[in-house]
């Protein structure tokens, strides 16, 4: 069910856009989404799982009709703060939308959080129009990753992220989506450098959250406007460190043969 909201003021969006500009991973994620996205103008579009809402906001800036949804109450509230109306709270595989409601659905870090991902794929078949597209961003399954083992040792486990499964290979994602979806493009991104940065920032955020006794999210790190107010000094430090973080992430360019830790695909409903 959606709750009407007043149109957000520009000042309420500035914090999220500023934070986005200091996030190497979020920028990389959004670039990959846009590369696979059809022009949304004149189309009915849906984004699901867009973290604190900045992806939802940036997608709506591209035109077209958009609705947004997520699992986590804090994430839903943050998305609504940025984009206003047409924001929905989901509970797993079911959605409140009518049959054939959308031309395009963007799913960001969602499948790994729900118990029945295949039932959700059947729901996508129901709400998409024939020929409609779905863009899905998920963790890329890498069972031999030493970096993943390190993250688990410092507490950044799948459970901490709210993941019910560690990720997907291209084959397992195709199997999950089912035979009615035809893969139309796929890429991995976020190699070693980007993941080192992400691990350091998640670890730092978790330390800050515990010290402040702040509420946790069922989706790992969801930074809201209230978090920024509580941790102004730390986020100013992040701004100062951003050039170094970006340089660390640029190590990815030296590893073109390495599969990324994130997988994003585009599929067409046949």
Image: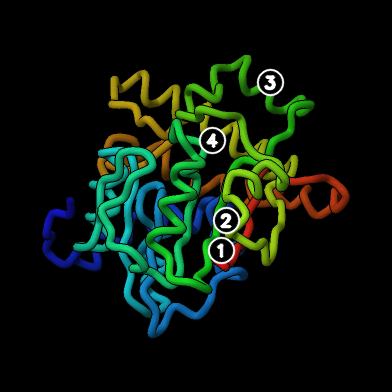
Please tell me which residue is depicted at 36% across the width and 71% down the height of the picture.
60
For the residues labelled 4 and 2, the Cα–Cα distance comes to 16 Å
Q: Nearer the viewer, residue 23 or 83?
A: 83
What mark, if any, has residue 201 been given in the picture? 4
Tag 3 or tag 1, which sits nearer the N-term? 1
Label 2 secondary element: helix
Q: Which mark is residue 150?
A: 3
Q: Residue at x 68, y 47 (%)?
A: 190
Disc 1 to disc 4: CB gap under 8 Å: no
Q: Secondary structure at mark 4?
A: helix
Asked if the residue under mark 2 is in contact with the one under mark 1, i.e. CB atoms within 8 Å, the reply is yes
Q: Is residue 185 above or below residue 149?
A: below
Alpha-carbon span between mark 2 and mark 3: 23 Å
Quadrant in which residue 197 is drawn: top right
Residue 115, percent across and down? 45, 31
Q: In this rendering, does residue 248 appear at all?
A: no
Identify the secondary structure beneath mark 3: helix
Q: CA distance from mark 1 to mark 4?
A: 23 Å
Sequence-wise, the earlier of marks 4 and 2 is 2
In contact (CB < 8 Å): disc 1 and disc 3: no
Q: Nearer the viewer, mark 1 or mark 4?
A: 1
Q: Which numbered dot is residue 33?
A: 1
């Amino acid at each position: 069910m959606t709750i009407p909201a007043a149109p957000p003021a520009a000042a309420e969006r500035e914090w999220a856009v500023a934070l986005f500009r200091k996030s190497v991973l979020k920028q990389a994620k959004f670039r990959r989404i846009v590369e696979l996205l059809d022009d949304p103008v004149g189309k009915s579009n849906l984004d699901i799982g867009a973290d604190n809402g900045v992806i939802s906001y940036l997608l709506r800036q591209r035109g077209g009709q958009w609705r947004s949804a997520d699992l986590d109450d804090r994430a839903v509230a943050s998305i609504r703060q940025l984009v206003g109306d047409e924001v929905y709270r989901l509970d797993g595989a079911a959605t409140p939308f009518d049959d054939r409601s959308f031309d395009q659905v963007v799913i960001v870090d969602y499948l790994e959080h729900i118990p029945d991902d295949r039932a959700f794929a059947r729901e996508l078949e129901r709400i998409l129009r024939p020929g409609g597209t779905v863009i899905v961003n998920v963790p890329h399954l890498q069972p031999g990753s030493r970096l993943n083992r390190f993250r688990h040792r410092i507490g950044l486990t799948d459970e901490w992220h709210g993941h019910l499964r560690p990720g997907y290979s291209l084959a397992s994602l195709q199997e999950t989506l089912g035979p009615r979806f035809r893969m139309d493009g796929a890429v991995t991104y976020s190699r070693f450098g980007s993941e080192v940065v992400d691990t350091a920032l998640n670890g730092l955020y978790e330390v800050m959250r515990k010290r402040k006794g702040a509420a946790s999210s069922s989706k790992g790190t969801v930074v809201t406007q209230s978090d920024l107010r509580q941790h102004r000094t730390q986020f100013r430090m992040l701004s100062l460190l951003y050039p170094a973080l970006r340089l660390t992430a640029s190590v990815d360019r030296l590893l073109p043969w390495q599969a990324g830790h994130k997988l994003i695909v585009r599929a067409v409903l046949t």
